[in-house]
Structures are given as structure tokens and as C-alpha cells.
Image (cartoon, grey):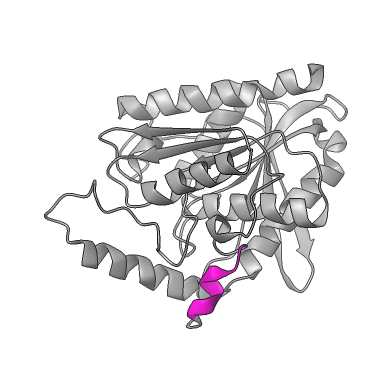
């Protein structure tokens, strides 16, 4: 599919590392630099720790589409990106994935200088299931380490795995809501197992955390024709109520995956430019 669409990763430097995870399988991370050469240690570039989307069960940093998107973002924003190749369900289940993502974040913070990045200009982001994991990591950071996070970027995120905030209003009537909900519950069951109570835990469903105070400024992108728009927009309201600066943008006429189709969907090109502009503000953080 990627070849048919002409999707090819740009020529940017990258390097892989294996990060140990206490009590869980190690996680592979890939570091992307903005140029064709590795950024030298101590350069102090901003860095984004990012988690791909795939319903907790598919995809990864080796998928051409994700690899190309991350390389392009690193190049266009002039930043370092560290992407975690967290484990798939059902072979590995919660809490393996958030713990792997947390360890990738902690590793990035500890090794920022040697990666040519600055630990004072770190952002966290993710798409879909990766948005769930990104939001979980910011909660874990608040609860465990309180490292400064400049902002979090959530793209069509899944944030309530009880499916209590799924919004079917934008779905075509020819796609019955019961089918969409059944598919969603199947993915959740593969990730969390059969105990429905696990879905109410904050690191599984960040929207259901008892408090959202102390979380980083957040940019949330949602799509009109995506049932998960309810999660993202409810999270924006929860963050705002907790005093967290938040911007939420709904892309009219877009589906869950269409914002990733840069070069083919005009709205995706707009989303890319918006995200790049937001990532570039990380340069301002150091001067603040």
C-alpha cells in the first residue's frame, strides 16, 4: 500500500536502542534526527517522545507509513524524535505497554544530551492507541518523577477504554453503531483482558483519572467522522477544568485515519503544518 501511494521515508539519520523495562519485556526505540547526519551530543535540540497508533494490536515503527511520518516531522520541525516500538496485544497486555512507554520516556530524559537533545524541551505525543499511551505517560510522570514536559500532542486519541465517551454522531448511518462498538470492545479486550474493571484504571483510561491537575499543556486533534472524537474532546474539557492549558481542534469531514494521509488529503497537510508549528515552539521553551 505504501509503495502504491508513493510513500517513502525521507533520508534522515536514525539509530535504534533497546531500553530495559522493569518487570516487563524490553522495548526498542528509534531515534530520528532532523538531518541526514546524526545531531552531535550537546546540541540541545527539542525532543518529542512519540507512540504510534494501531489499536494496541498492529503497526509499529517499522511500518513504512509511520517511519516516513516520523522522519518527516523530525526534518520539518528541526527536532529529535524518539519513537517507542511498544508490544502488541494480546501477546502482551496492560500494563506492559504503558510501562514500556514510560521507560522510553525516562530513557530519553536520561540520555537527552548524548542524543543532541535537551531534557528541558521534551514533549510527549501519540496517535489513537498511542495517544492513550502518551496521556498515560504524562500521568505516570506526574505521579512518579515530575520531569518537566513542555506539552503533549494527542492525535485522534483513545482515552476512555470503558468506551463511555465514544461519540457515534458523526458516523455514516450505513455503519451501525453496534458494529463499531463491538469492534472497539474486541480491541480493548485484547489489550486489557477480560476484567472490565481494568478499563477504569487511569493508566488504561487517562480520561478517568481522579485528577488532571499538573499535566502539561496539550494540543488535541480530533476528526468529525471518528467515534473517538468524543474521547479527545471530553479530555480537553477535563484538562481545562483542571487548569491545564489545552487546545482542541476538530477536523470536519475527516475520519480516524485520514489525517495521516499527507500529500493526498488537504486536511492532513493542514494538520501536519499545525503539528510542525507546535513542535517548533519547543525552541521557545528554552528562551522562556
Q: Which residues are magenta?
A: 196-202
Q: Is residue 105 above or below residue 77?
A: below
* Of the pair 85 and 257, the residue shown nearer to us: 257
Q: Is 63 left, or right, of 29 in this rendering?
A: left
Q: Is residue 256 above or below residue 79?
A: below
Q: Is 35 left, or right, of 198 in this rendering?
A: right
Percent x, y for residue 98? Answer: 64, 61
Residue found at the very far bottom of the displayed protein: 194
Residue shown at the point (60%, 50%) measured from the top left? 135
Circle count:
0
Percent x, y for residue 111? Answer: 85, 43
Q: Is 228 left, or right, of 205 in this rendering?
A: left
Residue shown at the point (72%, 26%) measured from the top left? 37
Q: Quadrant of residue 71?
A: top right
Q: Is residue 287 above or below residue 21?
A: above
Q: Was residue 59 drawn as part of the magenta stretch in this picture?
A: no
Majority secondary structure of the magenta segment? helix
Q: Was residue 200 drawn as part of the magenta stretch in this picture?
A: yes
Amino acid at each position: 500500500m505504501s509503495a502504491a501511494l508513493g510513500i517513502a521515508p525521507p533520508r534522515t539519520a536514525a539509530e535504534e536502542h533497546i531500553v530495559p523495562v522493569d518487570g516487563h519485556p524490553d522495548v526498542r526505540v528509534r531515534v530520528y534526527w532532523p538531518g541526514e547526519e546524526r545531531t552531535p551530543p550537546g546540541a540541545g535540540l527539542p525532543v518529542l517522545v512519540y507512540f504510534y497508533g494501531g489499536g494496541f494490536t498492529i503497526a509499529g515503527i517499522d511500518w513504512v507509513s509511520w517511519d516516513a511520518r516520523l522522519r518527516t516531522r523530525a526534518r520539518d520541525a528541526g527536532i529529535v524524535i524518539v519513537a517507542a516500538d511498544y508490544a502488541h496485544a494480546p501477546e502482551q497486555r496492560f500494563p506492559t505497554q504503558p510501562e514500556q512507554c514510560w521507560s522510553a520516556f525516562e530513557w530519553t530524559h536520561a540520555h537527552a544530551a548524548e542524543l543532541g537533545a535537551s531534557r528541558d524541551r521534551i514533549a510527549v505525543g501519540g496517535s489513537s492507541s498511542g495517544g492513550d499511551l502518551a496521556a498515560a505517560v504524562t500521568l505516570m510522570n506526574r505521579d512518579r518523577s515530575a520531569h518537566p514536559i513542555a506539552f503533549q500532542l494527542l492525535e485522534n486519541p483513545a482515552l476512555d477504554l470503558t468506551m463511555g465517551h465514544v461519540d457515534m454522531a458523526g458516523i455514516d448511518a450505513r455503519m451501525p453503531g453496534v458494529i463499531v462498538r463491538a469492534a472497539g470492545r474486541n480491541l480493548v479486550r485484547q489489550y486489557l483482558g477480560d476484567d472490565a474493571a481494568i478499563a477504569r484504571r487511569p493508566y488504561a483510561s487517562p480520561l478517568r483519572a481522579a485528577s488532571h491537575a499538573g499535566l502539561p499543556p496539550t494540543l488535541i486533534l480530533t476528526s468529525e467522522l471518528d467515534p473517538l472524537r468524543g474521547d479527545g474532546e471530553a479530555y480537553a474539557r477535563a484538562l481545562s477544568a483542571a487548569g491545564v492549558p489545552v487546545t482542541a481542534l476538530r477536523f470536519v469531514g475527516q475520519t480516524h485515519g485520514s489525517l495521516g494521509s499527507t500529500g493526498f488529503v488537504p486536511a492532513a497537510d493542514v494538520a501536519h503544518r499545525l503539528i510542525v508549528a507546535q513542535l517548533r515552539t519547543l525552541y521557545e521553551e528554552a528562551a522562556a
